Amino acid sequence: MVDVIPLKNQDIKKELIDRAHFIFWAASGSLGDSGAFRIVTGDGKSYYCNYAYGDADIDVILEACPLICEDAESSGYWEDWVFHDLGGGNFLLIRKEHEEKYNELLCDNGEIAYEYQNWHRTALKICGNPEAFDDDYEEPDPDELNGTESPEDQTVFVAWKDGGSSIAGAMSDGKVLYFNFDKGVGIEAFFPISRLKETEGWVYQDLGNDGSHILVNTRYSDYS
């Protein structure tokens, strides 16, 4: 198991960010670990905090790491970085020097596979941490993710409300509420909204000018 070093306000300084080779962040209300901020440094160490849970203040993070501010690209901060949208309000910056190797390790039939689940261990391997590929790790089964009994097929509806923040990409998908026959009602990274919108059998509707939206699976409803 790879040790993760927790971050508090006093630990989040420019000097630490300057050592980062991979920077991950999740918008408030994102799918998965909402509010997460994680970096992997060149020496293979992993650092983590979650501003949504009060581990550290978002203002402190943004001051030390302007790379994740919403105007970072236009301000030229990404000149030496490659930006990857991992879906569901989750984002990753990769130093350009690692782009080719990173894509190679994650590539499956010409496309990057399961990036959200695998970026961290891949980053650790690139940065020289051999524990990132220990024997206990299991890759997700593509059949379980994409088969007829996959979570998205059992999901009746997905509803969310836009949320704003000064973090880059925070408006992507907002907070998600779903009902799934298998898992019940909850909030979970079961499927990116952006992909559901493009999937046959789903009906999208804007619920009003307050930023509320819903997607309904027509397999279980004649909602229109």
Image (cartoon, rainbow, N blue to C red):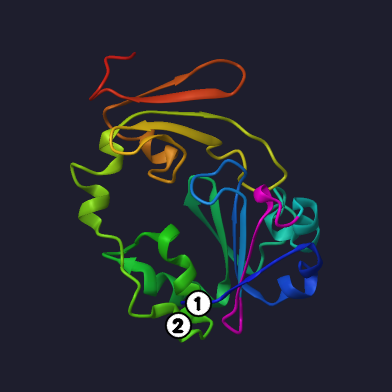
175 relative to 51, above or below: above
Instruction: Decide if residue 183 is on the left or right side of residue 48.
Output: left
For the C terminus, the quadrant is top left
- 12 or 8: which is nearer to us? 8
Rounded to the nearest angstrom, the CA distance separating label 1 from label 2 is 6 Å
Q: Secondary structure at mark 2?
A: helix
Q: Residue 60, located in which quarter of the rendered image?
A: bottom right
Q: Is residue 107 one of those drawn in magenta?
A: no
Label annotation for residue 131: 2
Report the number of numbered marks: 2
Q: Which residues are magenta?
A: 41-56
The residue carrying pointer 1 sits among few (fewer than 14), some (14 to 19) or many (20 or more) residues within 10 Å by Cα, namely some
- 107 or 34: which is nearer to us? 34
Contact (CB < 8 A) between labels 1 and 2?
A: yes
Whether residue 76 is visible to the viewer of this picture, yes or no, is no
Q: Position of residue 155 (x, y in %)?
A: 31, 33
Query: Going from the N terminus, do you reach mark 1 or mark 2 first?
Result: 1
Residue flagged by tag 2: what amino acid is it? Glu
| Residue that lies at the very extreme toward the left in this rendered image | 148
Q: Position of residue 136 (x, y in %)?
A: 34, 75
